[in-house]
Image (cartoon, rainbow, N blue to C red):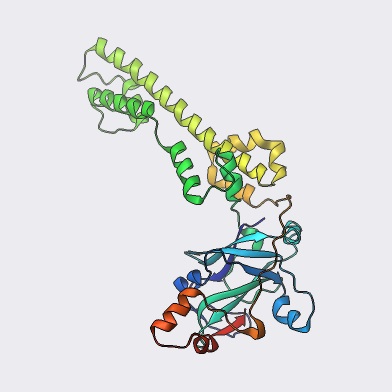
Amino acid sequence: MPDWIHLIPAGAEIMTQDRRGPYRLDTNSVVASLAPGAKLPIDENHAIDLAGPRGEPSPARGYITELQARADGIWGRVDWTEAGRALMADRAYLGISPAVVHDGEKLIIGLARASLTNKPNLRGLTALHQETSMSLAAVAKALGLSDDAGEDQILGAIGEIKKPSATETALQSSLAEIGVALGVTSAEPEDILAAAKAGKTSKVSEEAFVALQAEAVAISNELNTIKEARARDLATAFVDGAIRDGRWSVKHMRDHYIAMHMQDPARVEKEIGAMPVLNGGVVVPPTPQPANGEVALQSAQIEAAKALGIDPKAYAATLKTETL
């Protein structure tokens, strides 16, 4: 289940399959076009634009609640309806077709809505079932946080897990001192341990060397234990988060995936992220849309128009909504 979907690709020129482009992207304007608390509907095959005006059903299958600029373009966080979740679980649609707002000169400055489609027109978009991120709520639960924890809280909690403990810092310091005594310039535990085992006693007596060698081995072993425990904590948090997120096929191989994650986190996260999500969702009431293809200005756009002495309605009339 993709929590984030790729809506508009990046690049100096945004091309389309039907050659209506190239378009250009004003990233900041697009991200700012979604006011806090606002939602943009996701329908099927542009039903809002095509079926709605004829009085036919055009239900939303999800709502875009947040826009984010990334290196590869604009992404949107989606709150899927129950029907939308079923479509995603069934992998019924390949991609997304956005309805963008542009200035008439092909500069995209906003997003009106988006549609599930099996014939995406924009080139360079990530397919729906390639997104691998799991829900923040699931990660928050795995880290012992509340379901509504934000990204900053989650990243902070992960950072605390990854942060060296006071014990580890003290051990690293002690090991570095042993390295100096052994004449090793590297601060890496492996190099210091290798020097101790090799018997580099040029700067210390035999008795002192034996003591240093034993201490180096003990500290190195303790550091490895701490690092392994931290890797297991991170792996357990990710795998359990995936299970809570609805990737039930992970549950039966939980210990296997935890062990794999400790060795190769990136590979396991990619593999698990590609698995289908099988849990249900919550139905969200539809968001009213402007009639007759008009573009609804956000408060910031209205204030900007007033500051320039431009009638907001006249400014809105110059903007174009186009389904891509």
What residue do we see at 60% from left, 47% from top? 137
174 in relation to 131, above or below: above
What residue do we see at 62% from left, 57% from top? 3
Q: Is residue 46 visible?
A: no
What residue do we see at 54% from left, 41% from top? 264
**Is 124 displayed left or right of 56 in the figure?**
left
Q: Position of residue 301 (x, y in %)?
A: 47, 78
In the picture, the quarter occupied by the C terminus is bottom right
What residue do we see at 45% from left, 71% from top? 28
**Is 96 displayed left or right of 208 in the figure?**
right
73 in relation to 220, above or below: below
Q: Where is residue 24 in the image (x, y as percent from the top left)?
A: 49, 79
Q: Position of residue 81 (x, y in %)?
A: 71, 60
Q: Position of residue 248 (x, y in %)?
A: 72, 43
10 in relation to 149, above or below: below
In the picture, the quarter occupied by the N terminus is bottom right
Q: Which of 61 and 187 is in front in this view?
A: 61
Q: Residue furthest left?
A: 203
- Quarter occupied by residue 89: bottom right
